[in-house]
Image (cartoon, helix red, strand yellow):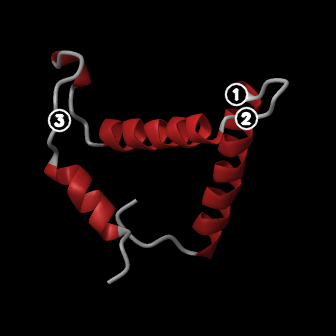
Amino acid sequence: MSHMPDSKELAQLDSASAQLIDQIVAGLQNERGVHLETAIGAAGSLAGVTLLRATGVNLSELTAGSPVFVDKVNESVKSFSPS
């Protein structure tokens, strides 16, 4: 998405976000509940991987733990930041 989402897109994003949160919680929940830091980390990891994949960088060419610097990622994040 290279533009600010309209109300229909925001509603779709809201619904998708709620479903994702439900899946994360369901996957991590045990008899004691959900470890908040783990749930936040899982959501952050998914967001990062999704953004990185959207850049088109061939991740299979990288060794595990390699730093990845992609200007396109920085520009994507800036496009959603308030001016």
Quarter of the rendering containing residue 79:
bottom left
The image shows a total of numbered marks equal to: 3
> Residue 49 at x, y = what percent?
39, 35
Give the amino acid at mark 2.
Val
Quarter of the figure that contains the C terminus: bottom left
Residue toward you, 13 or 29: 29
Q: Residues within 10 Å of mark 2 (few under 14, many from 20)?
A: some
Identify the residue position indicated by label 1 in the image: 28
Identify the residue position indicated by label 3 in the image: 68
Give the amino acid at mark 1.
Leu
Mark 3 or 2 closer to N-term? Answer: 2
> Residue 51 at x, y = what percent?
36, 44
The tag on residue 34 is 2
> Residue 5 at x, y = what percent?
50, 70
In the structure shown, which secondary structural element does the residue marked by tag 1 occupy? helix
Is 6 located above or below residue 34 in the figure? below
Instruction: Tell whether label 1 touches label 2 (CB within 8 Å).
Output: yes
Q: Residue at x 41, y 39 (%)?
A: 50
Give the amino acid at mark 3.
Val
Residues under labels 2 and 1: Cα distance? 6 Å
